Image (spheres, rainbow, N blue to C red):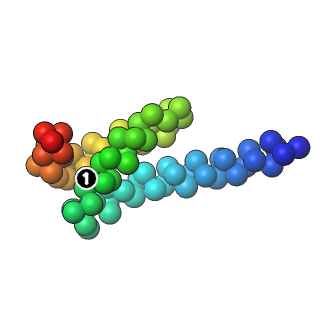
């Protein structure tokens, strides 16, 4: 019965993670100095097994590139 208790929790945690992924590019717009950390976190999240979460991460990275292409290019050059 323990796995049945954990299933709703993991679903809720996934929804919280997805919302955080959606919010990260906005945080970066307000605080551009956080771009390296946010890009690093999103890059690590690309390893997720959940396809919808993976798609959100890709979208968030593209949003970062659109909002600060120079900063993203500098990150890839280092």
Rendering coords of residue 30 (x, y %):
26, 67
Q: Is residue 11 left or right of residue 32?
A: right
Q: Where is residue 40 in the image (x, y as percent from the top left)?
A: 32, 47
Rendered residue at 36%/56% (across/down):
24
Would residue 38 be visible to someone looking at this image?
yes
In the displayed image of the protein, which residue is found farthest to the bottom? 30
Q: Which residue lies furthest to the front in this view?
A: 78
Q: Tell me if I can see residue 69 in this picture.
A: no
In the current view of this chain or complex, which residue is farthest to the right? 1
* Residue under the point 42% across and 51% down: 21
Residue 26 lies, in percent from the top left, at: 32, 60
Q: How many numbered marks does the figure carry? A: 1
Q: Nearer the viewer, residue 52 or 4?
A: 4
Image quadrant containing the C terminus = top left
Relative to 14, is 44 on the left or the right?
left
Q: Against 26, is 61 above or below?
A: above
Point out the image quarter for the N terminus: top right
Give the side of residue 36 with respect to residue 14, left or right. left
User: Residue sitting at 61 percent across and 52 percent down?
Assistant: 13
* For residue 21, side relative to residue 68 (left or right): right
Q: Name the residue under label 1.
A: 36
- Give the image location of residue 62, x and y in percent: 27, 42
Sort mark 1 into few (<14), some (14-19) or many (20+) by Cα contacts within 10 Å. some
* Element marked by disc 1: helix
For the point 53% across and 32% down, the residue is 49
């Amino acid at each position: 019965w323990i796995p049945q208790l954990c299933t709703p929790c993991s679903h809720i945690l996934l929804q919280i993670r997805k919302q955080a992924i959606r919010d990260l590019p906005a945080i970066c717009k307000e605080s551009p100095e956080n771009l390296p950390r946010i890009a690093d976190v999103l890059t690590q999240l690309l390893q997720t097994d959940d396809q919808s979460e993976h798609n959100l991460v890709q979208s968030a990275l593209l949003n970062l590139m659109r909002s600060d292409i120079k900063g993203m290019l500098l990150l890839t050059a280092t």
